[in-house]
Structure formats: structure tokens, C-alpha cells
Amino acid sequence: MGPGRRGLVAGVAALALLAGCSSGARHAERSTEASRGTPDQAAPGLDAARGFQPARKYQATSVPARLEIPSIHVASALARLGRAADGTVEVPSRWEVAGWYALGPRPGDPGSAVILGQVDSTRGPAVFYRLRELRPGDEIDITRADRSSVRFVVERTAQYLKTRFPTDEVYYPTLTPALRLVTCGGQFDFTTGHYRSNIIVFATIRS
């Protein structure tokens, strides 16, 4: 991403991030509807509802802690990213460490988990310097805080002008687990101090 923290900000400044639905709310609504039977006649499905465990009681997927991409020799801890004061997605503060967008899905959960990383710095190449070299079939490994792991496989790598950042493709909810890796690329604009494009890797979970 250009020297220092300048790279990804321009590429994600206008993102409108989409929130998922609350499954817990839907379960509560179903339970309320099931309880509307008469005293001497149970509502349809009530027996099944009694044995159903709300999703909020299930063990949540552990947060991602480490990223490894063997084909390009990337091995990095994962910083936790949120939003900056201006509402944009934060970028990693350390050029050698990638970051996971923590307001989105966790890797392995349904949806597009997003990991961002710098492409370079004033000191040289950064963690995602070789991201553009990834090809279909390359593997991406995520280790979680509980030491479990999940593997993704690259589908494609693409370059987009920042003025045409594919927000829907990167952040839009999906029914299956997906992973997006984002950095900067293309030509560097010395006038603005930013790269003009983003490199994005699209990957799906290894079944």
C-alpha cells in the first residue's frame, strides 16, 4: 500500500458495509408464534420448538489469529481491524502484519471474511507485496485463537481501479464461507501519494 498507511484508505473509503440478520431474533419470533395455541391444543410444531436450541447458545467460531500462504511465503499474525473515525475500514498499522476486518464474518463462517495488508512501505516490501502472484488452486491457511484451522483455495486474483472498487463482491454476504484478501497495486500516483488500484484475491473454503 503506498509508503506508510496510505494505501488501502482510498480504495475502501466509500464502502457501505452490510449487516447480517439476527438468527436469534427469528427464533424468538417462531417461539412466540408457536405459543399461540389454545390451552387444550398445542400449536403446530410446538414439540419440535421445545427441543430447539437457540443459535446464541452455540459455541461461536474462534477469532482468526494467524495467516499463512505457502506459495508466496506469507506467514503473519492477524491484527484486529475496525473502522476509522471517518467511517472507513481501518488498515493495518504495521506494514509486516495483515489485519482481519472484525466487523465482518470470521473465516470459516458463512459470508465473506476480509483480510487487508500493506503492499510496501518506506522500508521496502510489506506483507502482501506478492499477493498479485496468487493463482487459482493456491492455498490459504487461517489458524484461529483456539488453535483450530480452516483452509481456503484461491479462485481468482484481480486488479481494480480504486474508483471502481467491487464493494459487493468483497463485502456482500454469501451463504458459504469465503475469504477476500485486499492490498494496493497498479501504478503509484506520486501526486496523491496513493496507488491507483487494489489487488483482490477471491478464495473459497476447502471442502
Image (cartoon, rainbow, N blue to C red):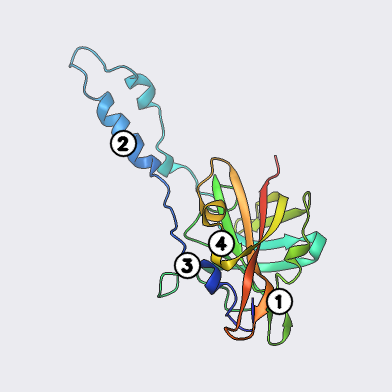
In the shown orientation, is residue 36 left or right of residue 183? left
Which residue is disc 4 drawn over?
165
Labels 3 and 4: the sequence-earlier one: 3
Return the mark for residue 126: 1
Mark 1 neighbour density, 10 Å: few (under 14) some (14–19) many (20 or more): many
Labels 3 and 2: the sequence-earlier one: 2
Labels 4 and 1: the sequence-earlier one: 1
Q: Secondary structure at mark 3?
A: loop
Residue for point 63% across, 69% down: 197
CB-based contact (under 8 Å), mark 1 and mark 2: no
Q: In the image, is residue 185 above or below residue 6? A: above
Which residue is disc 2 drawn over?
28
Residue type of the residue flagged with mark 4? Phe
Return the mark for residue 82: 3
Labels 1 and 2: the sequence-earlier one: 2
Q: How many marks?
A: 4
Which residue is more in the foreground, 81 or 190?
Answer: 190
Residue for point 39% across, 22% down: 48
Q: Position of residue 64 (x, y in %)?
A: 60, 59
Q: CA distance from mark 3 to mark 2?
A: 29 Å
Q: Secondary structure at mark 4?
A: loop
